[in-house]
Image (tube, grey):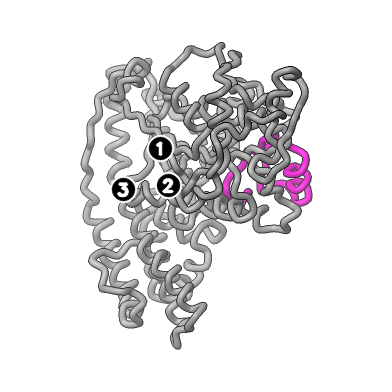
């Protein structure tokens, strides 16, 4: 490890190190650049091994004997873009946009270690959407920066609440999915030490939109503790500027570091790649199902439009738009309750559920579409309850299950070796057969090579493995979930 001794620069920046996320809060940081250079800091130069923890509200727990420098690992090849991004992320709430494979995990590990070091009583939280991603980060942080395992805890929903409470109180570096963190934040205040949180790292930060738990976690921590750093990581921050703006707003981001494959400082570390886009027509089956579903949901949508819950007639309807209008309706109801409140709530439930399902149908196919309605414990549970009460919709879904042999959803075993589910299946989207053809062509030409297929959902992974297994030994598929 190299101890980077840029003392005055680090001290000055550290005076702004914990809460610069929005212009509304800038008044909290009208501080003199030399505030930390007081007599206590002068003392530590004479005795650098004596721990001196700040106890005022802005820097509670800051160790002045360590805070005049930060650590960057010298046992890894030096990449200038990683160093630059890491330095920025230590002192600003930063969204890091970096292509896959270029070291977002490395940056997170270095930032986590330094905040952990600067605040010996502070808490550091790493959140990822899935447990496998969480587990990967635990190993990476230990391997890259040597964060002690004794201070580390993986917090999962399978642990009893009292066990999680003990972990939150006794450990310092936490790895969890946002749903678990949010559940504990919403529990008794003494269970979750929000005031001690000094860093929150968010992997796959582009998910911090709509109703996803990332935004609620940040908002709830900020209500109890305005002084913490946020590091958000993503390879794809959003499809539109509005998506990116929502992520920035929800995560209190004040600084963005962006690198693409063709960025000058990244180019030496990027392999040449050819990108081909294959446009696949949906086909008559999916188009017909979509049309019938729109007809079934139309009465609910018309009632919403007639109830004036939309300021103007929308040109396009999406699940995201409906969720926004639903939130607006609930806020308005706090002041003046609509006479048809219960009916409108139910109509919103059906429309949100159906439009989300239609999005799954178009992007992922009939099987993922049906899995959405079969999953009674996942997302949109309340909305799916309203859908289940509609006999026409229920009959239509039952007909689809029968037509496409959807008797048992495909599932992947814990070790990813076994795929359960019926064999006589229709994969439900033309893209799967196109994928199969592409891979067969590739492996016929390069039989000893390897290929990676990235999927958004576990059931897509299961379907693709089942499909490709029919092409052994040419294709030998394996799952990593």
Q: Which residue is mark 3?
A: 241
Q: Earlier in the sequence, mark 2 or mark 1?
A: 2
Q: Which quarter of the image is occupied by the N terminus?
A: top right
Rounded to the nearest whole Å, what is the CA distance between mark 2 and mark 1? 9 Å
* Segment tinted magenta in the rendering: 152-181
Q: Is residue 329 left or right of residue 73?
A: left
| Residue 339 horizontal/vertical position (percent) | 45, 88
Q: Within 10 Å of the Cα at label 2, are there few (<14), some (14-19), or many (20+) other Cα atoms? A: many
Q: Within 10 Å of the Cα at label 3, are there few (<14), some (14-19), or many (20+) other Cα atoms? A: few
Q: Are marks 2 and 1 in contact (CB under 8 Å)?
A: yes
Q: Within 10 Å of the Cα at label 1, are there few (<14), some (14-19), or many (20+) other Cα atoms? A: some
Residue at 61% in and 27% down? 114
Disc on res. 248: 2
| Residue 162 horizontal/vertical position (percent) | 78, 50
Q: Nearer the viewer, residue 128 or 438?
A: 128
Q: Which residue is mark 1?
A: 256
């Amino acid at each position: 490890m190299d101890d980077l001794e840029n003392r005055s620069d680090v001290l000055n920046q550290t005076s702004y190190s914990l809460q610069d996320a929005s212009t509304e809060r800038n008044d909290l940081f009208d501080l003199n650049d030399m505030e930390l250079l007081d007599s206590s800091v002068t003392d530590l130069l004479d005795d650098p091994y004596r721990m001196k923890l700040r106890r005022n509200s802005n820097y509670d727990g800051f160790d002045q004997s360590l805070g005049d420098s930060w650590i960057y690992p010298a046992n890894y090849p030096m990449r200038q873009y990683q160093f630059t991004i890491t330095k920025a992320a230590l002192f600003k709430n930063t969204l890091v946009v970096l292509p896959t494979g270029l070291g977002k995990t490395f940056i997170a590990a270095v930032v986590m270690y330094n905040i952990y070091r600067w605040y010996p009583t502070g808490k550091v939280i790493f959140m990822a959407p899935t447990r496998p991603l969480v587990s990967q980060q635990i190993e990476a942080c230990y391997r890259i920066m040597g964060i002690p395992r004794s201070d580390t805890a993986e917090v999962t929903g399978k642990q009893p609440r009292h066990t999680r409470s003990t972990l939150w109180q006794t450990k310092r570096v936490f790895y969890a999915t946002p749903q678990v963190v949010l559940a504990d934040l919403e529990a008794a205040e003494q269970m979750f030490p929000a005031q001690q949180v000094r860093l929150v790292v968010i992997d796959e930060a582009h998910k911090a939109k709509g109703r996803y738990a990332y935004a609620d976690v940040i908002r709830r921590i900020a209500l109890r503790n305005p002084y913490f750093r946020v590091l958000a990581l993503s390879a794809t921050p959003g499809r539109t500027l509005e998506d990116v703006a929502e992520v920035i707003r929800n995560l209190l981001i004040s600084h963005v570091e962006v690198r693409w494959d063709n960025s000058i400082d990244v180019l030496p570390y990027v392999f040449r790649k050819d990108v081909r886009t294959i446009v696949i027509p949906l086909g008559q089956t999916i188009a017909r199902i979509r049309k019938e579903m729109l007809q079934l949901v139309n009465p609910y949508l018309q009632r919403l439009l007639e109830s004036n819950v939309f300021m103007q007639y929308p040109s396009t309807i999406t699940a995201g738009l409906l969720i926004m209008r639903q939130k607006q309706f609930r806020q308005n109801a706090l002041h003046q309750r609509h006479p048809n409140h219960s009916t409108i709530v139910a109509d919103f439930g059906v429309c949100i559920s159906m439009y989300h399902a239609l999005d799954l149908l178009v992007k992922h196919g009939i099987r993922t579409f049906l899995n959405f309605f079969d999953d009674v414990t996942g997302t949109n549970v309340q909305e799916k309850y309203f859908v289940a009460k509609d006999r026409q919709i229920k009959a239509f879904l039952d007909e689809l299950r029968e037509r496409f042999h959807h008797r048992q959803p495909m599932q992947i075993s814990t070790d990813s070796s076994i795929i359960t589910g019926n064999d006589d299946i229709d994969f439900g989207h033309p893209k799967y057969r196109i994928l199969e053809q592409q891979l067969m062509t590739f492996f016929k030409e390069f039989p000893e090579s390897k290929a990676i297929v990235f999927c958004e959902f576990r059931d897509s992974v299961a379907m693709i493995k089942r499909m490709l297994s029919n092409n052994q030994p040419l294709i030998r598929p394996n799952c990593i979930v």
